[in-house]
Amino acid sequence: MSITSNEFSPTRRLVLKGAGIAALIGLGAVPFDVAPALAAANDAYPAEAFKQKSEADAIKALYGKTAEPSDRVKMDAPEIAENGAVVPISVTTTLADVTSISFLVSENPIALVASYRIPAGTLPSVGNRIKMAKTSNVTVLVEAGGKLYSAVKEIKVTVGGCGG
Amino acid sequence: MASSIRVRATSNGDTTEVQALIQHPMDSGFVKDAKGEIIPPHFIQQLTFEHDGKPVFLADWGGGVSKDPYVKFAFKGGKKGDELKISWVDNKGATDSTTAKIQ
């Protein structure tokens, strides 16, 4: 089996190479189809924001502006988290034109936990599970119409989720 | 290999609700192992959901997201039988993707 396939391999390789090149050319011919997906991919990972230790610095790096508290940002989170490794938190808002929703835990070694981008047509509501090192304020930021709104809640943690 | 991504997407005719569960250690880089050595950071950085060639949801994650992360969201549109494409990339450059049918 292997002997025969070795015999034919040079031609096979050529054929595969040819196919590869054809595929590349094919891709090049339809860049406009790919553009919307690339636009999302170009929304680069905010690495700087995920390096900041403090909440304020993370918000600055991520949004470059300050948030105002809003009662239209509703956070659904437990009062007490028995296990800091898995704290379920969800957020929903009645604000219009929401473009992003972010979660920050001020007492975590890195404050920013997650940031979600909400394209038009996607509902401004996100649920996820986060880690908390210890009892801390959890801040949710909602960017809507170019402005930043926030809601804060203290969650008590009985067992830390960051190697405590 | 089985996909690391499990997705449930259900349409009620108007909106599609999506729940995803991904198998990933999500090591933050702050946790020590049994020997007292730091477990190096290993976590998903970006997770994208595409419907009909357009992104409907994009997550940027740090190490503070729980192990085997879960996320839930909803978007307008999407019919039963439509495809939803999900992919992630982690801080080590590993990726996975899958396609789920909206139910």
Image (cartoon, rainbow, N blue to C red):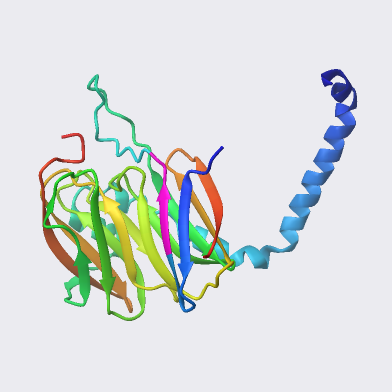
Q: In this view, does B18 lie to the left or right of A134?
A: right
Specify whether residue A3 is in view: yes
Report if residue B20 lies within the magenta region.
yes
Residue drawn at (47%, 79%), measured in percent from left and top? B14
Front in this rendered view, residue A46 or A36: A36
User: For the image shown, how many numbered marks are present on the structure?
Assistant: 0
Quarter of the figure that contains the C terminus of chain A: top left
The image shows residue A88 at horizontal and vertical percentages of 24, 55
Q: What stretch is highlighted in magenta?
A: B18-24
The image shows residue A68 at horizontal and vertical percentages of 17, 73
Residue drawn at (71%, 63%), measured in percent from left and top? A30
Report if residue A22 lies within the magenta region.
no
- Which quadrant of the view contains residue A19? top right
- Which quadrant of the view contains residue A161? top left
Residue drawn at (44%, 72%), measured in percent from left and top? B75
Q: Is residue A114 left or right of residue A40?
A: left
Q: In this view, does B36 lie to the left or right of B54?
A: left
Residue drawn at (43%, 63%), measured in percent from left and top? B18
Q: In this view, does B74 lie to the left or right of B65?
A: right
Front in this rendered view, residue B13 or A74: B13
Q: Main secondary structure of the magenta part?
A: strand
The image shows residue B9 at horizontal and vertical percentages of 47, 63
